[in-house]
Image (spheres, coloured by chain):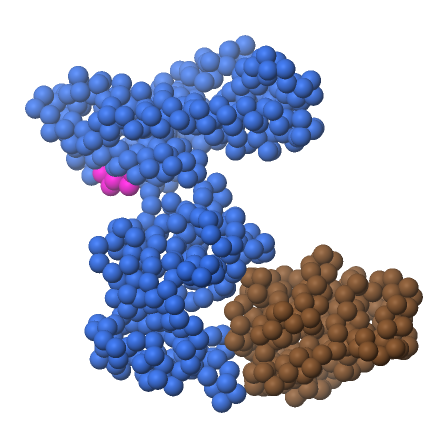
Chain colours: A blue, B brown
Amino acid sequence: MLSEFVVVDDADVLSVDALGEALSARVESRGTERRGWLDTFDWRLYRAGLVLEHRASPSGRSGFVLSDPEGRRLAQLPAPAGGIPSVDDLPAGQLKERVVGLAGLRTAFVRASAEGPVGVLALLDAEEKTVARVAVDGPLVVAGGAEPLPVRVRVEALRGYGKDARRVAKRIATSPQVRLADETLFEAICSAKGLRPGVYRSKPQVRLDPAMPAGRAFGALLDELVGIARVNVDGTLRQIDTEFLHDLRIAVRSSRAVLKVAKGVFDEPSRSLHAAELKWIGDVTTPSRDFDVYLLEFDDLVDHAMDPEAMRPFRTLLRRQCRNAHTGLNRALRSKRFARILDGWPDELVASEDPGPEADVPIVRVGGDRLRYAWRQVRRRGNAVTDGSPPDALHDLRKRCKELRYLLEHLASLYEKRAHKEIVDELRQLQNNLGEYQDAENQRRLILRYAEELIAQNAPAKTLVGMGRLDHYFEHRQAAVRAQFADHWTRFDRKHNRRVFATMLESR
Amino acid sequence: MKVLATYSIKGGVGKTTAAVNMAALAAMEGRRVLLWDLDPQGGATYLLRVRAKVKGGGRGLVRHRLRLVDAVKASDFDNLDLLPSDFSYRHLDLVLDGQKKPTRMIGQLLASLTSDYDVVILDCPPSVSLVTENVVRAADLLLVPLLPAPLSVRTMDQLDSFLETTKGKPPAVLAFLSMVDRRRGLHRRLVDELPRERPDLVDVMIPVASAVEQMGVRRAPLVTWSPANPVSQAFAQLWQAVIRRW
């Protein structure tokens, strides 16, 4: 940061040539570049200390520059000319592995881009060895930004020649034409585009005051949840990665859970209307999410089918269905109905002239009541499950567990941390067991459904045999998970957890 | 992190030229490369315009008075760093001899750089010594330049014997013909005969060329300033052979 400057008066005196002459430095390169900064939507690279930039010149030359958040260059990597920059284009090696590993399920895409002149000066020693570089960037026109960014001068230190870089930075700092930058170029580009690197949330972070009226508290939670749903719409429409839809659905499901427990808090007709509208979003997003999950897991799954090549027709069918599902989803997401659902209704609910009787009751009381109720619902359903219970009984228990979990997470700020964490951890273990069971159940249903479709399409016998093997694998997995349920349930429902839950509720 | 060492018992066979050009090619592919010039003559250091000086010398590095990474100097080329030569390296054998597990010191020092580099290239002095034993134990691959000369087969046999006597898993060996002058009858004959006697010789020849001498004038790897030169092309093929062997 100490070696990056902003030109306050970008007169000729700080052009590349003028600066080169002033510093007795050689012009190493100059030209115009189109630059794009890649990261995942939740800034996984930036949060891990990496800034990945793609640069392309009009002559067709392009490459990646990997830096740390302070702007220190870690590596320069070649990139194929043309096309949309992607981490898939990074050359094989540790850096690519690291970037791909950090991104995980998410896709690193161009978060911000800019275009403008770039010049690099090289400061040489007596052996004509480069001991520091000075990059002169700009003025850069940021895509989606209002004004071009002023010219920046950045001193790039080279390993083993820190002193030389500090010396030249000191000289530049004495110029009245520059001031020390208070943010890096990357941060400035992001700011110009209205982005804040590293800032992302998939869950509401509302700090609730125990005395806060329940109406306002639930309203604040819903407001954040709807905001989270809203920011994930564009990525879902563009299918940048599957996590946009995932986060959108979680925000919608969480909102439904809040609306459900807010019965008696909000104006009832409005509450039930919004609950029904959110359910509609849940319903229209389910097929796409299911296909996303199947395809994400497909490569791992086909290993169980022995002959992955034989499963190609199944994969093709899934891909086609997934495409169709997303086309339908995009239609729904672009509809007026959807736009209305995400349009500031939490404020209207809070401001209603006919609120529910508990609207002004402190959230700590209403929240406690609802948590106790959700806890009882989970216990009632869990205790009713026997070895002979159908899959739907477990599915129903899973849904109640989710509602309890959302409520616990949203109201976390009201309770003592340790007890709250213990309960959430215990619940998570039970949810993992139920989730695994349900996933296997869904997989088996899907295999059966598509086996019938593939038979109708005269798919090769080996594909159907492979699907049979897959079904067999899931049958075993489901049975194994089911056999573990009783232990998980006994653990969750033990006296100790009930005591911790009660302690948690009394902690405020 | 892969460790490649250019090594030969004989001097003047093109070790440093190979090391510098291999390092540049790897860096141009986007790999983070460290070239460690272990030769007290400092040929690679000179070619990259870096001062042949390490604070505390070889003794300081081996005795951990200086962290290896703090002795590294950036070259003028992206992704390519250099651990410079130091004249004190001529006594490196003696320094290593005074250490516990003296044949594993270089490997242990390099272990501290695993997250910083994808490729380390060791440019070794021509000898059979404790430094060489260290290099052999640290390297994944030995790149061995051979002159098209009758003694070359004997040189390879000596290397085999040496590798058999060293402890630990021996590195892979990739030998190639270096400084080949097709105008000379002996070279032409040996280029045909040597691969028959040593089938492990890679099918890449580095021709003798004035451009290689020009590297000393330009002080930069040949592949960076004349990529279309036949010698650069041959080095590019050699680099591909190295990658295949990894």
Residue B211 location, quadrant: bottom right
**A179 sits left or right of A310 in the view:** left
Indicate the position of residue A114 as horizontal and vertical percent values: 33, 57
Q: Residue at x 56, y 86 (%)?
A: B51
Observer-nearest residue: B97 or A363? B97
Indicate the position of residue A486 as horizontal and vertical percent values: 53, 20
Above or below for A218 versus B69: above
Q: Residue at x 42, y 67 (%)?
A: A72
Q: Residue at x 39, y 65 (%)?
A: A71
- For the record, the magenta segment spans A204-208
Indicate the position of residue A215 as horizontal and vertical percent values: 17, 29
Please say whether residue A414 is visible from this viewpoint: no
Residue B227 location, quadrant: bottom right
Q: Quadrant of the N terminus of chain A?
A: bottom left
Indicate the position of residue A112 as horizontal and vertical percent values: 34, 52
Q: Residue at x 80, y 71 (%)?
A: B177
Above or below for A102 versus A372: below
Please say whether residue A505 is visible from this viewpoint: yes
A206 within the magenta span: yes
Observer-nearest residue: A504 or A411? A411
